Amino acid sequence: MRAMVLEAVGEPLVLRQAADPEPGSGEIRLRVEACGVCRTDLHVVDGELPAIATPVVPGHEVVGRIDRIGKGVHQLGPGQRVGVPWLGSTCGTCEYCLCGRENLCDTPGFTGYTRPGGFASHLVARAEFCIPLAEDADPVATAPLLCAGLIGWRALCRTGQARVLGIYGFGAAAHLLAQVARHQGRRVYAFTRNGDLAAQAFARSQGVAWAGDADATAPEPLDAAIIFAPAGELVPVALKAVRKGGRVVCGGIHMSDIPGFPYRLLWEERELVSVANLTRADAPAFFAEAARAGVCATTRRYPLEAANEALDDLRHGRLDGAAVLVP
């Protein structure tokens, strides 16, 4: 197999050749067709997540076809197309797993972080955590749905019945989420880096009602806001933008420190919450809603060997939509 490997935190990935991995009991091996490049991959590469054990192969928006199955795998078969998301395993026995909140498992495994990921030609994954995909699914267009889409969906669900929705940071997750929210009859306002006219134009191309700078005042008070940008300074900005009883949802796995802010921004029953990881139940709900909404991912393809270029383009905001590696 070929893989782009993180051998030292903060250093570029290195292309390595190795024997194809063999699936163990309950596992499958798939030939990777496409793997999205997510901001979480940047957090892994840049050492912004805890306890990163190198070497590791990043990538957790993986689409591929099964080419070998391990013992005890009966629900999936060779040749089948599947997706491999961020949540790679759970213990199944902690209080969170037992009450339907496996996204908060005490001892989880994460694809491309604590388990090998999809920046490779082949990948081994736990079969029960793989998502069956349609045979006619476009691997490149589907890959970003496996994290940007799923986390965006989980964040959207946390906004409840909000009809006026603000999104701070308009990248891969936001452009997918905006399509779903519009389909549901919500009005979407997009907030981008100050002065980023290209990002604002891209947001408008996705049908948002308004797009402007992150510190701009929206045309009307928001019922809820979702922050995808890993910038803690946006939390008080978003709290100021939501109406009484509104909610601000932090959708990232990592964010810079949140600065102090006056209590009046939180008062009047405003809420600040986060989302963490995903559950297996999120996938069928999101994919069904995405199909109804006709969600279409905007992507830019890169060969596997250009993973560092893709990460750098994401790091510096040079992308509309999502980067996708194609081995």
Image (cartoon, rainbow, N blue to C red):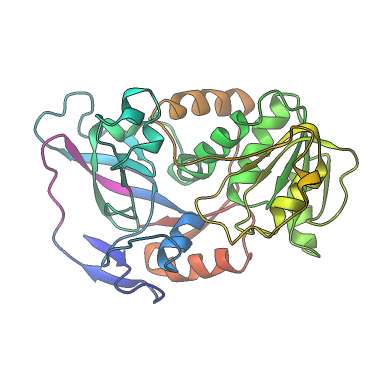
Lateral position of residue 121 relative to residue 69, left or right? right
Residue 112, horizontal then vertical, whole percent = 34, 54
Lateral position of residue 245 relative to residue 42, left or right? right
Lateral position of residue 228 relative to residue 59, left or right? right
* Extreme residue toward the front, this view: 263
- Residue at 29% x, 53% y is 114
Q: Which of 190 and 313 is in front in this view?
A: 190
User: Does the magenta-highlighted stretch encompass residue 81?
Assistant: no
Residue 230, horizontal then vertical, whole percent = 60, 57
Residue 62, horizontal then vertical, whole percent = 38, 46
Lateral position of residue 142 relative to residue 14, left or right? right
Residue 185, horizontal then vertical, whole percent = 75, 24
- Residue at 70% x, 26% y is 183
User: Which quarter shows the C terminus?
Assistant: bottom left
Q: Quadrant of residue 270?
A: top right
Provide the residue span drawn in magenta. Answer: 20-32
User: Does the magenta-highlighted stretch encompass residue 31?
Assistant: yes
* Extreme residue toward the left, this view: 71
User: Which quarter shows the N terminus?
Assistant: bottom left
Q: Nearer the viewer, residue 242 or 268?
A: 268
Q: In this view, does 192 lie above or below 280?
A: below
